Image (cartoon, coloured by chain):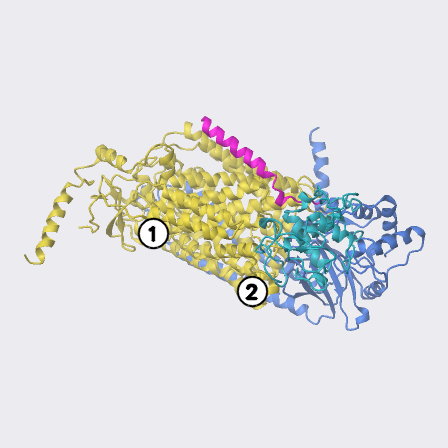
Chain colours: A blue, B yellow, C cyan
Amino acid sequence: MRVRAPAFAAVLPLVLGACTYQHYQSDFGRGAVEDDQFLTLFTIFLAVCGVMYLLVIAFLFAGIWRRGRTADANVVETGRHHQSHPLMRGTLIGWSILIGVGLAGLAIASFFTDRSMAKAAAHEKLSITLTANQWWWDAQYNSDDPSKIFRTANELHLPVGVPTRIILRSNDVIHSFWVPSLAGKQDLIPGRESDITVVPKRTGIYRGQCAEFCGTQHAHMALVVNVDSYPDFVKWWDHQLRPAAAPTNAMTLAGYKYLTTGPCSACHSIGGTPASGQVAPDLTHLASRRSIAAGTLPMSEGNLYGWVEDPQSVKPGNRMPTIGLAPDQLHAVVAYLETLK
Amino acid sequence: MTEREPIEEENRRLAQRRRKIARDGKDLTGAKLAGRLERTWRRPPGIVGWLATVDHKEIGRRYIVTALLFLALGGVLALLMRLQLARPDNNMIGAERYNQLFTMHGSTMMFLFAVPVMEGVAVYIIPLMLGTRSTAFPRLNAFSYFMYLFGGLLLWVAFVLNIAPDVGWFAYTPLSGPQFSPGKRADVWAQMITFTEVSALAAAVVLVCTILKCRAPGMTLSRMPLFAWAMLVVAVMIIFSMPAVALASSMLISDRLIGTNFFNAAEHGDALLWQHMFWFFGHPEVYIIFLPATGFVSVMVETFCRRPVFAHAVVVLALISTGILAFGLWVHHMFATGLPRVGYSFYTAASMSVSIPTGLQIFCWLATMWDGRPRFPVPMLYVVGFIVTFVIGGLTGVIVAAVPLDLQLHDTFFVVAHFHYVLIGGAVFPLLGILTYWYPKITGRMMSEALGKVGFWLTFVGFHLTFFPMHWSGLLGMPRRVYTYPAGLGLELPNLISTIGAFVLAAGVVLFVVNGLVSLYRGAIAGPNPWGAASFEWATSSPPPVYNFEHIPVAESVTPLWDTVDDLPVVTGLRVDDKEMLLTTVVAAAPDLREPIPEPSLWPLISACAVGVVFVSSIFSPWALAVGIVPCGIALTAWFWPKELKRHPEPVID
Amino acid sequence: MSSRFRASCIIFGLTALALGACDREEHHSRAKPIGETVPAGASPATIFPGGSSPAPLDPRAKLYDDNANAIAQGQQLFSMMNCVGCHSHGGGGMGPALMDDEWRYGGRIDQIAASIAEGRPNGMPSWRGKLTSDQIWNLAAYVRSLSGLPSKDAVSSRSESMSAGTPQSLTPHGEIENSDAAKQ
């Protein structure tokens, strides 16, 4: 009895963790119509396959259970090993019909679900071009009005209930866009353009991850999707169009100066400043995002310090070099980045 | 003198010579025959003879031992991976090393263990099962083993030297291309493929010819054992599918070595071309691994239920149709790539329909158990474990065959669970069972039943503990090939259970190996037929003499040893002082030709070395192909140099 | 174990250890901070009035020269930093060709790195302060591969973009001709 309590205490957090986490990167997140359709189809498949499995197991155990009998077995010892029980052939035919009918039914269910997913995703009203790089996501929100186009990275906002077409491209290797609670995955293949339409139906925060092995830091290429109500989404869009916040004190001014004239601007862009590098995530509204480095670290001041100072320790092998800032430079840079909401 | 006289003169001389040739028969039988056959068939002793052997039993044993070694190495990698994934945000193993680990694990298990072990078991047992003295083309058989060994050494020596590939076992381009995989790691992987494909093709040719032409007289196709049918289908599948991956890997090397643009989209190549070519091989590959296991199950079910498998013809047709259908499914690995949706529906239907023949085979086995009187020594425990486990894997396969479901489950741990259920449940469990079953035949001793039972339960429980939670973590959003995962997604508990289960599974496999080693010295001595089985391999001693059978047996039914009342009928007349075997016709197995069998020779080894040097050096320079062709040519010429016939030609059976 | 077997085991082990330090595949993901650029006082100049000799090779050279990962990173940086804008894919345009044997400011890796860091007359910008020294050295390693200077098994044969000439793995091994910078 005394041993059990500590063991239980060790296991309980795991079990609780297993039962009480948020389903924000899971097939049970139910964030979109497509996810509901997936779960329905999955349940149908599970039921039919479960029945088939139980039949097999029942037959197996019937055979094992019957092993005691001697006289009427069709075996070598009775000399009847070339005969079979008369019911066998009929059962074989019945079994094959059952399998055939079951599979045909499942294939038809799958086909219909596919079609209804495609129909639900028709009439897209919003278009985003998502370009995958090793190991971050570059997103451009498209619009017919060029002054409303903007670029962001690693985090998307989508309006609830509006079909959004995400155009998928890759700059280097094959990646895969996958937000389980919202939609199935689609690969981003260099040299090809494909697309996926997402129709979120519940507001909330969802997490996705790259789902095709893309190199060293494939494990740290996540994507956060915020599904907002339509008015909130419009507010967010308008906010994204604004340039970066201007520095207000000496510290942020020093940070601004370093960011726009130092090595950061060789790769990064900050809207409304001279920093206009296109090969790294856009930083204009960095501080309003929920994570750093494509989901590697949650956004916080401490994490920003750690990331900017030594990205190669946090995400070894990624494209952002460790620059080795002096302490006052680091303070200034992070102070300015924190204002980029 | 008319024209006929020289011919008659010749015939008279031949008839005189023929009377002097010693053959097995009524006059020469028993111990005297055994002694002379032994002298004719044994290979020279010592290291040279060991390297030069063409005895299929020795080569088969080597294949099995080498493959089990790779299983152990791959298993250790898996344990390391599981340790890294036991906790979220773990930093025991870094990203680069972890990527190498899963690449090595997948490549080792698929290319260096799964296919070669099936080939090895087949190469050992098929001639015995078919009642003949040797495989066809024994030197090609030896060559195939050495190519396999060199391919495995290439990959593992590279791992030890820290140039292991890190692009995943299927090495998608452009990640494995010249820009994103610097150095020689991906080239090492691609050439390992070339080695193992050449080896598999050679073994496949050997098996097809043996099964079609070297059967015992009277063993018509309808009387051929189900394992032989399975290997025939598998060998034909190898011949049709392996060239696709050998070609793809050569194209990859060419891109990486000399800058061709097969997979470069900017120059009108296509990254998806790799996927098509790889999976055109990759899907039949998993059936190449699975179908021999179905053959194993048929063998064990027949012996331990004490009756031939129910609906023999249905099982044969199921094997053949699985082999054919397997070639039409490969796009189901590419459902997320954005190909036309209508085409996908075809592959969904095809992928589901391939489970029908397998379902029928399962019915036949279950019906045999129901109708017969099954006993449950350790091999049969593995058969039960196989049914319980493989059917789950097959059904999760039906689940991921549906496009809307696959788009969520592809590249997640759900798929990892699926393929381990079908590969371990569907191939490794029958393999462990059949190794226990044929262990007395190979070594002459029985494996320990008690250790075997404990090993089975550890393996079975450990397997389910490891892989069942992965269905759950896949549904919770854990992708594949990640060296770590964040906390808070609910992935901690499934991963921890999987890690614990992995060690239990490892313990079970270790116990199996320990059982195998200990029983070599302490196992009960086995007679020729300890299980009371029906096929020809049990008609000779355990282990078999180097010449397999004193007299070639005749098959009169599908279960010959159960249907003969007195002694087994045999044919006599094969030469005793020269190595010779009997070829029969393909369908009716009527005696057809006598085929001389080659003496042990070092040329297969030397050719394998020459070819190996070409392959390995072509990783570094394209000149290797041009220069290396010379020693290869010399070795192959020496191998095929026509030998002066010591015996007199008389191929026709009179 | 026979003594011959033991001996061959030892030889194999030693070879493995020796080859294990395979410089081509070393991956240095922890880069040196930018503060450490060209060591002061050892300017890798190419013109030596009075007839002195070139400075000894920078000790960092062996980390980057012949290193496949450095060359690959350099290849990516070459297009990311728009070196192709002036140098094309080595053929030159506004900037001099990088695939030929003429190296105005020296063709050793440390001399190329200095050129990138300091900038050069006639339009080569200075990248010190914009790129870390690790990035500059990676670029230098790649630039050397354009004229076939590193060993062939370290270079990548082509990039995943439009083909721009001979694949680097087939580029004939180059020479370094230090040209007089005054000679235009």
Residue B163 rendering spot, x and y as whole percentages: 58, 44
- Give the vertical position of C123 relative to B500 (above or below): below
Tell me the kind of residue under disc 2: Tyr
Residue at 34% x, 32% y is: B45
Tell me the kind of residue under disc 1: Cys
- On the same chain: label 1 and label 2? yes
Question: Helix or strand or loop: what does disc 1 sit on?
Answer: helix
Q: Is residue A115 visible?
A: yes
Residue B642 rendering spot, x and y as whole percentages: 28, 48
Determine the chain carrying the residue at label 1: B
Q: Which residue is mark 2?
A: B344
Residue C148 belongs to the span the image colors magenta: no
**What residue range appears in magenta?**
C1-29
Residue A79 rendering spot, x and y as whole percentages: 30, 44
- Give the vertical position of B516 relative to B363 (above or below): above
Residue at 47% x, 32% y is: B515
How many numbered discs, if any? Answer: 2
Q: Which residue is mark 1?
A: B209
Question: Helix or strand or loop: what does disc 2 sit on?
Answer: helix
Foreground residue among B564 and A268: A268
Q: Badge 2 local density, few (<14 within 10 Å), some, or many (20+)?
A: many
Query: Which residue is the extreme one toward the right?
Result: A249
Q: Is residue A59 visible?
A: no
**Would residue B38 appear left or right of B354 to someone viewing this image?**
left
Foreground residue among B221 and C55: C55
Query: Which residue is the extreme one toward the front?
Result: C50
Q: Main secondary structure of the magenta part?
A: helix
Numbered disc in front, either 1 or 2: 1
